[in-house]
Structures are given as C-alpha cells and as structure tokens.
Image (cartoon, rainbow, N blue to C red):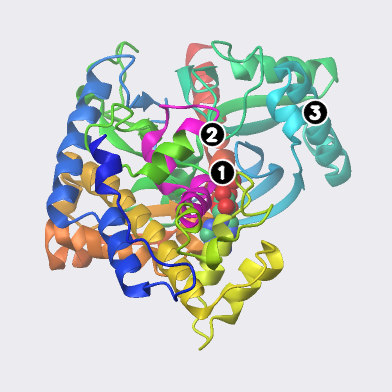
C-alpha cells in the first residue's frame, strides 16, 4: 500500500501545459539508485552467489559449465555453431586460422512464436532442417565426415557434461512443451538422426560462456563474460574448490567457468528497487515472479517499462492531453530500440522522438514538453538498467578479487552496444562502488559473437579433449 501512496504524482488541469520539471523530478526519484543502494545490492548479490556455489536449487543458480581449459589462440579447423535463445536462430561455420583469427559463414532463420510456444519436437525438427539447409548450401558436409557443433542454448540448463544438459525452465518468451527436465542435446541430436544429418553436438554452450571464450581467444586477460541483449546473464572463472556443490569427482583442472544465470537475482524482492511500472510488467509477463533482475535490465523488457511509465502519465492526463493509441496500449509494442533513437535525439524540437511517437506509435499529437518527458523516461529506465548491470559485475569482481587486478569484462548484446551512454553509465556506477581508479584496472570490452564464435570454440575444445581421452585410454 505504501508503494501506491509514495507514487502520488502532481495532478494538472488538462487545459494547462504539464509541469515538465515537477514530473521529471518525481520520475527521477522513482528510478534513481543512489550509491548506498548500489552497495546494498552488491552485498546481497555476493550472498546469493555464495548460496548458488554451495548448493543446488539456489535463486542465482551458479551452474558449472564443464568448460575448464582456456584457448591458446593457435587452434585451427572448421567447426559449426548453432545459436538459439536470442532474436533469431543462427547457424554458422567458423574456420579457425590461428593467431586469434577466423573466417565465418552464417545464415539466420526466424523462429516463429508458434514454434517458441509449441512442442519441443517441432522446434528440434525445425532446427535440424535449418542445419541441414546450411551444411548443404555451404558444402560443409562434403568436407568433413562428421562435423562438430557447438550449440548455444541460452536458457538455464543443468549440465552433467560438456554436451549433456537438462533444461531447468524457459525464459525470454520461449515455452515449448516436452523440454523442461529433458536433455536438450539428446532431443536435438535425435532430430539430427531422424534426418540422417551427420553432425555431432560436441558441446552445449551458454552464450555468456561463449562470450568469455571468444574474447579470451584474442585477449587472455578476459575474466568475465556478460550478456546485455534480449536477456542478461554472466559467467566467470571460479576456483573448483570454490564450487562446494561440485560432485564431478577428481579433476586435474583448478578452475571452471560458472554460468551464473544472474537474471534470477533477487526474485525474492529483497533489494531491487522495483517500481509500480516494474510490478505491472512482471504481473503481465509469462513468468511472473521470475527473472526479476533481468526484467529491469535487458532489451526484452526496457521498452515495456518505459511504455508502462508513459501510460501511467497518460492516465493522469500528464502526457499527450490524456490521449493514447492502439499501438501504445499494446503490450511489448514500445521497443527498446526506440529508446535508443529517442536517447540520441538532440534536435531542437525532438523530431526523431516525434517520429517514434506520432508516426510509429500513432499518438495523435505530441507537444515538445510531452517529448521531453518521454525522453527523460527513456533515459531513466536505461540509466537504472546500466547501474544494476554494473552491480552484478562489481559483485563478481569483488568475489574473485579481480577488482584489484587488471582484467577485461567481455560484454555482448545490443543493449550494451547501442543504448546511448550505456557503458559510460555502467562505469559511473562502478566508480561509485570501487573508487575512480577502478577504470585503470577493469576494462569493459564489446565482445561480438560469443554465441556463434564462442560456441565453435567450445566445440573445438570439447572435441580436442575427447580425442586426448580416447588416445590415452587406447
Ligand atoms: P540476442 O540477445 O537476441 O542475442 P541482441 O544482443 O541483439 O540479441 O539483443 C536483442 C535485444 O536488444 C532486443 O530485445 C532488442 O529490443 C534490443 N535492441 C535492439 N536494438 C537495440 C538498440 N538500438 N538499442 C537498444 N536495444 C536494442
Ligand atoms: Mg546474443
């Protein structure tokens, strides 16, 4: 109840111009995360990480990835990668040339909503058709008798080996039946067999792990992989002795990449500064109460938070004279990419913002004051996302001690790449947490294609490891 009381906004006579200053101040307060609160979030985050490392079933799952080695950069050969879990399904062939260099061929396929929410068997058959089409068109099947494929499956998977893993639950709009608690590699490999497709799934790869591997191929000091795209997640190298729940038996390796699945952080709502706009988004989502951290940070959701905020002001007659439109009233219709367009709009009368609102979203008419308020909302939602993402990174850096050393954080995803000033806003938060000189030690790097190239890398490493095993046991 107190949430509602604290969300009183100034009311205005609809015939008057909205008080831009008062409204923006109110919104700024709602979306602000002061430094003290950042620190509280980091403290809680570290606690949750520890729970995940100690036992199965924690909110932040901290999943061992079975990726133990680090690439040298000199590996060679052709490997396939399959990327599912983002906007498109992608099939790629990478030719590793050594010295951190490679060539790539790739093809994208659209996964319909029907496939995303239908039977898993149909989705697997569709994927097998895409891979079949790709290897036929690229002539890859003539080159190698048995192609090795790295499968980027960017959902929470409980792995039992490098190419074995059961799906824990779906995220990001997928909801196929017959997949949860099943081994997704077996399901897909069976679909390949049904089509006589001679492709071996050598590894199941989370896109965060791929991001780390791909970047480490060129920059060995990379210590963390982060995704800020449709969803958000991260991984890092953990000491094997630090993973108390690990029951993999004796291993010669000292460290293993841990896939955090940090999107679920604070599903308990202990520290995240949730607003009524977030609550509405969550309630209307297909997974209420889940992925609370992700819902405040990633590309799938930021537009919707902004839309909820805009609509709340419309309903109070503080925007567009109380007018809305069919598009603005439609869930998910306000895309996160529009926020980047609006954020970059520096024209005197905010003409790009006008275009988004009036042409794309069909709002009958907007004033300059309206557009200023919308721009401010986009800024606030983006800034809050950047600061929360920085909290996640800070928690890991503090946990591993990397915040005291020189290290590189590899970050992939359109939100990081395209959202105006996203990196700078993350850096500001990191400085508030660690002091200004953190920037001399920790560097954020845009890492492209972890889910493609990274998956091929993990397939290569898995294949090499299995060959070594075979030759030593022979
Ligand atoms: P994926 O996570 O699917 O691999 P991306 O990293 O490209 O792919 O992220 C896609 C997400 O990024 C989508 O949710 C989309 O809303 C968002 N996005 C796309 N373009 C932009 C942009 N220009 N600015 C901010 N977000 C964007
Ligand atoms: Mg991606």
Dot 1 alpha-carbon crowd within 10 angstroms: few under 14, some 14 to 19, many 20 or more: many
Cα–Cα span, label 2 and label 3: 17 Å
Q: Nearer the viewer, residue 153 or 102?
A: 153
Q: Residue 57, how many percent across, how many down?
A: 34, 15
Question: Residue 314 versus residue 408: which sits nearer the camera?
Answer: 314
Vertical order, 449 against 286 (above or below):
below
State the image quarter where residue 22 is shown. bottom left
Give the residue number, with chain letter if any, for mark 2.
154
Label 1 beta carbon within 8 A of ligand 2: yes
Q: Which residue is more in the foreground, 146 or 248?
A: 248
Task: Give yes or no for residue 296 being in the magenta stretch.
Answer: yes
Q: Which segment is the magenta one?
A: 283-311
Upstream in sequence: badge 2 or badge 3: 3
Other residues around mark 2 within 10 Å, as few (<14) / some (14–19) / many (≥20): many
- Residue 426 appears in the picture as rendered: no
Disc 3 to disc 1, C-alpha distance: 19 Å
Q: Do the residues labelled 3 and 1 touch (CB within 8 Å)?
A: no
Residue 238, position in %: x, y?
27, 33
Q: Do the residues labelled 1 and 2 touch (CB within 8 Å)?
A: yes
Q: Which of the two discs, 3 and 1, labels the residue nearer the N terminus?
A: 3
- Residue 412 is left or right of residue 351, and the answer is left
Residue in the picture at 51% in, 20% down: 169
Check disc 1 and report the residue beneath it: 451
Side of 105 relative to 400 (left or right) = right
Disc number placed over residue 159 in the picture, else none: none
């Amino acid at each position: 109840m107190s949430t509602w009381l604290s969300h009183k906004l100034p009311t205005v006579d609809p015939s008057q111009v909205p008080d831009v200053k008062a409204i923006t101040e109110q919104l700024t307060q709602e979306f602000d995360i002061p430094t003290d609160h950042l620190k509280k979030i980091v403290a809680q985050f570290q606690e949750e990480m520890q729970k995940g490392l100690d036992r199965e079933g924690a909110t932040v799952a901290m999943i061992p990835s079975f990726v133990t080695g680090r690439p040298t950069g000199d590996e060679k050969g052709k490997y396939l990668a399959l990327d599912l879990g983002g906007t498109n399904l992608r099939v790629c062939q990478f030719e590793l040339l050594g010295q951190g260099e490679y060539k790539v061929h790739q093809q994208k396929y659209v996964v319909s909503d029907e496939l995303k929410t239908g039977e898993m068997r149909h989705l697997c058959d569709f994927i097998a058709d895409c891979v079949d089409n790709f290897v036929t068109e690229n002539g890859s099947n003539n080159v190698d008798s048995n192609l090795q494929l790295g499968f980027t499956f960017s959902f929470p998977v409980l792995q039992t080996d490098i190419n074995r893993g059961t799906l824990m639950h779906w995220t990001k709009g997928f909801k196929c039946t017959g997949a949860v608690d099943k081994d997704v590699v077996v399901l897909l490999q069976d679909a390949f067999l049904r089509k006589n497709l001679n492709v071996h799934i050598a590894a199941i790869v989370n896109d965060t792990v791929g991001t780390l591997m791909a970047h480490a191929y060129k920059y060995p000091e990379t210590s963390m992989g982060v995704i800020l795209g449709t969803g958000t997640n991260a991984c890092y190298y953990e000491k094997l002795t630090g993973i108390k729940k690990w029951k993999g038996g004796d291993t010669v390796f000292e460290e293993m990449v841990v896939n955090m699945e940090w999107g679920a952080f604070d599903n308990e709502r202990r520290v995240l500064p949730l607003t009524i706009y977030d609550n509405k988004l969550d309630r209307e989502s297909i997974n209420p109460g889940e992925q609370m951290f992700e819902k405040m940070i990633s590309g799938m959701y930021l537009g919707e938070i902004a839309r909820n905020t805009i609509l709340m002001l419309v309903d109070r007659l503080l925007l567009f004279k109380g007018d809305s439109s069919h598009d603005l009233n439609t869930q998910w219709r306000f895309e996160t990419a529009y926020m980047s367009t609006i954020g970059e709009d520096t024209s005197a009368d905010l003409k790009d913002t006008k275009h988004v609102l009036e042409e794309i979203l069909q709002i009958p008419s907007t004033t300059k004051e309206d557009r200023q308020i919308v721009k401010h909302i986009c800024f606030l939602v983006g800034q809050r996302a950047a600061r929360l993402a920085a909290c996640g990174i800070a928690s890991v850096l503090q946990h591993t001690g990397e915040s005291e050393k020189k290290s590189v954080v590899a970050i992939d995803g359109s939100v990081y790449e395209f959202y105006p000033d996203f990196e700078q806003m993350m850096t500001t938060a990191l400085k508030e947490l660690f002091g200004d000189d953190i920037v001399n030690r920790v560097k954020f790097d845009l890492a492209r294609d972890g889910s493609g190239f990274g998956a091929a890398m993990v397939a290569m490493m898995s294949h090499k490891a299995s060959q070594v095993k075979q030759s030593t046991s022979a």
